[in-house]
Amino acid sequence: MASATRSALPTPFTSTLADSISTQRPSASNCYPPDLVKSPNHFALLPNRVMPSEQRKPLPSGTRLDYYRLHKLIGSGGFSLIYLGEEDDSHNEVAIKEYLPKRFAQRGDDGIITFENDETKDKFYRGLKLFFLEAKALATLRHPNIVNVRNCFLDNGTAYLVMDYEPGKNLGRYIKRRKGGLSTRFLMTVFPPLLDALALIHESQHLHLDIKPSNIHIRPGGRPLLLDFGAVYHLSGEEQKKAQVITPGFSPIEQYRGIKKVGPWTDVYAIGASMRTCIEGRPPPAATERHTKDTMVPAVEAFGKRYPRHILQAIDRAMEIDPQKRIQSAALLLKELNRDPASRRRRTAT
């Protein structure tokens, strides 16, 4: 039977806990990562335990975490589980994201995280540091189209990120259900506000680096919300050079080549690919395929009879394979989408 390492908060984590994570009241200002990992030896003294047979089972309904009570699991990804919960004082519904990467950790019968070996344990804690960096990035960004962080805290040997709960639908699932063909009105309701939010992210010297329909939430009335900053990267930092997230169809060629090549234009490509997916109903070809032999028909040619030309041109320019030929920023792409074609025709005529 495989042995397992039982999770406990490592010494460098707990030694800075008072300075970095408040346990008094919920607050987004808590979201500052302690120095989680200075060397793998920090975790060498954790005891070995038997790995439970269950894999990544969610916490049961009614579980109490910090100032919150869990209601049910509402989402999951490769690195986290997301619960619907309720805040004690306000009784507001909240979304609580639990860091629990399925490749590196499992949950014991008592709810505490366990590991197969020291290698997976080390990877878990390195990812935990990035989880706090996501929280920190979100806590500093205030925009109606960026998910709002309320708090983050430690429990069960892992970390939790508390966000406003927003009813609505996932754009990725909506596209699949509708099989594409979303209207011009839909595109112009969803993507200009997202680009405005993305411009703020870029102004703060951050990149999202994982924009795709499944990370876009559509609230009632069509109001979009940009989700999942797990791949967020600070342009002046060295922390996450090995933390690339690649999604074929939405990640441009420079993301395959290393973090030094990325910039605001990288997120622009992902927005263009997401817009094209809304129209076509399926993801574009992977950037590596396009780089080898680009068989993708330009949007202007493929969908010119159904959508305004200036929108299709903006999508094509956003999805240029060569980053230097691409629209360079969210602000410039927003300007292209909001351009009045009639006024341009008048200027050309004169």
Image (cartoon, rainbow, N blue to C red):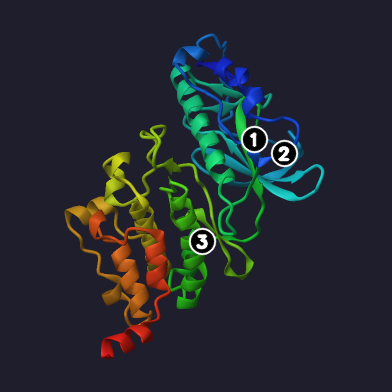
Q: Position of residue 323 (x, y in %)?
A: 26, 54
According to the image, label 3 marks what residue?
Answer: 171
The answer to which of marks 3 and 1 sits earlier in the sequence is: 1
Does the CB distance between marks 3 and 1 fall below 8 Å? no
- Kind of residue at badge 2: Pro
Q: CA distance from mark 1 to mark 2?
A: 8 Å
| Callout 3 crowding tier (Cα within 10 Å): few <14, some 14–19, many ≥20 | many
The answer to which of marks 2 and 3 sits earlier in the sequence is: 2
Q: CA distance from mark 3 to mark 1?
A: 30 Å
- Kind of residue at badge 3: Leu
Q: CA distance from mark 2 to mark 3?
A: 30 Å
Q: Position of residue 139 (x, y in %)?
A: 59, 44
According to the image, label 1 marks what residue?
Answer: 30
Residue sitting at 47 percent across and 12 percent down?
41
Q: Which element type, helix, strand or loop, lies under badge 2?
A: loop
Could you say which is closer to the camera, residue 247 or residue 257? 257
Residue sitting at 39 percent across and 76 percent down?
339
Q: Residue furthest right?
A: 89
- Kind of residue at badge 1: Asn
Q: Is residue 282 visible?
A: no
Residue sitting at 73 percent across and 33 percent down?
66
Image quarter hosting the C terminus? bottom left
Does the CB distance between marks 1 and 2 fall below 8 Å? yes
Q: Which element type, helix, strand or loop, lies under badge 3?
A: helix
According to the image, label 2 marks what residue?
Answer: 26
Could you say which is closer to the camera, residue 317 or residue 165? 317
